[in-house]
Amino acid sequence: MTRRAEPIRSVKGTRDLLPGETALWQRVEDEARRVFVAYNFREIRTPVLEPTALFARSVGTDTDIVTKEMYTFQDRDNESLTLRPEATASVVRAYIEHGLYNEGGVHKLYYLGPMFRRERPQKGRYRQFYQIGAEVLGSDHPSIDAEFLEMLILFLGRVGLREFALLLNSVGCPKCRAEYVKTLRRALDRVKSSLCADCQRRAETNPLRVLDCKVEADQPVIEKLPHILEHLCPECRQHFDRVTGELAQRGVAYQITPRLVRGLDYYTRTTFEVTSNVLGAQNALLGGGRYDGLAEMLGGPPTPGFGVAIGQDRLMLAVEQAAQLKAGDRLTAYVAWMGDTALQPATRLVQELRRENISAEISYEPIKLKKSLGIANKLAARFAIIIGEGELATERYQVKDMTSGQQEEVEPARIASYLKDKLMSSV
Ligand code: AMP
């Protein structure tokens, strides 16, 4: 007898999404696509694998992502490759590589897909996780920021979320931020000995990151550090005031959060996050902002940009809690046949229904009616269609509505349109 082999398990921090979950994931993705399209965004698909330099240059060499979290390896020809930890850099790379800027105007792009970061896994934090993101390239107009945030809030409402907060800040431009960083350094020099070891290091290498610190004991000290909003140059201040003014006009509620500097180096001016307290410790649902210098950092022409990355894994947790969006019926029709002569007409009916994009299932093994109806229930079929000797003789099949229990006789050729009408009238 051969010994059964040791089962192979998925990699730590990654997970399988089984059919029971993917139906709701698809609903959320469909909703995202609908909203993006309404705002004139179009899809872009970029590779999962990118040159390591792309992220080192854009995300920043002193960020947690680049120093600790990237899946980087030498390819066989010694090129250093990285599994993308985020997709904004890839979108901007593609924008430059294909000369999309030559078309002029504003480019609105969206993407969906897996990202990879070697973080400590916990609920809502994975090593392979999924983001739904969108980017606008080619305009630094404050109305773009406001319109974009309005779109995000609309999307969150569409997937049933109510309890969330839009946190807003400006991190200024390289000019005023450099001045602010000097001020912050001076303030940190006075207090850093009382901060955690990470913050003491960050105070030297990248003082803005201190504002991201989550260590409880550090919070009272960090709260008293100078705020970037008080150090914006007149142009950045005006930009921020126009964004907030327009958000108010559009009826989008926000909370100004001066400590929101975000973990990536490429941000300029507007930064934002949406948090939801239904999520627990990992409460950031999405984040993004303006990145007017990124295209140049990546060797392209100056191109202002604005974008978001929505953490889909966390979004799904919040959507499940809100319990408003349902996955919908799994199957429209289960075709139950009795007696050998019914198998062929039943197979033909299933084929016709599927051609009409009506989901249908059949068992090729002969089964009794009662068991067939049990299977229809288990498959969450909306209708069972019953074909036995009597139905073949009268040329009318029984169509049973599995929700109401009502049953009607319908001619085979009319069944597809009958089911479509029923489905339409029940939405
Ligand atoms: P970031 O690209 O860091 O701005 O992240 C954007 C969003 O992606 C966050 O708000 C999270 O919702 C989500 N996210 C980031 N890292 C992870 C992770 N390791 N696991 C799950 N979601 C994540």
Image: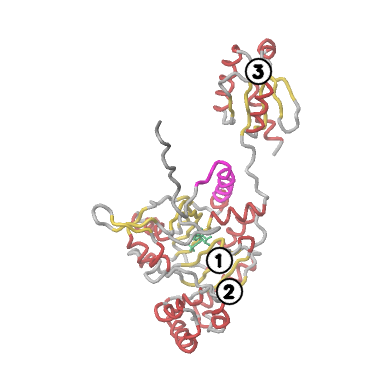
Give the residue pinned by disc 1: 273
Q: CA distance from mark 3 to mark 1?
A: 56 Å
Q: Are marks 1 and 2 in contact (CB under 8 Å)?
A: yes
Front in this rendered view, residue 305 or 183:
183
Magenta residues span 16-33
> Which residue is farthest left?
77
Q: Secondary structure at mark 2?
A: loop
Left or right: 200 as drawn, with respect to 384: left
Q: Residue at x 54, y 67 (%)?
A: 272
Which residue type carries mark 2?
A: Thr
Which residue type carries mark 3?
A: Ile
Q: CA distance from mark 3 to mark 2?
A: 65 Å
Label 3 vs label 2, nearer the camera: 3
Return the x and y of residue 248 as percentages of the image width and height: 64, 68
Q: Residue at x 40, y 31 (%)?
A: 1
Give the residue pinned by disc 2: 257
Give the residue pinned by disc 3: 387
Badge 1 residue CB within 8 Å of ligand 1: yes
* 32 inside magenta stretch: yes
Q: Quadrant of the C terminus?
A: top right
Return the x and y of residue 242 as percentages of the image width and height: 57, 72
Left or right: 342 as drawn, with respect to 139: right
> Which residue is farthest bottom?
190
Front in this rendered view, residue 295 or 370:
370
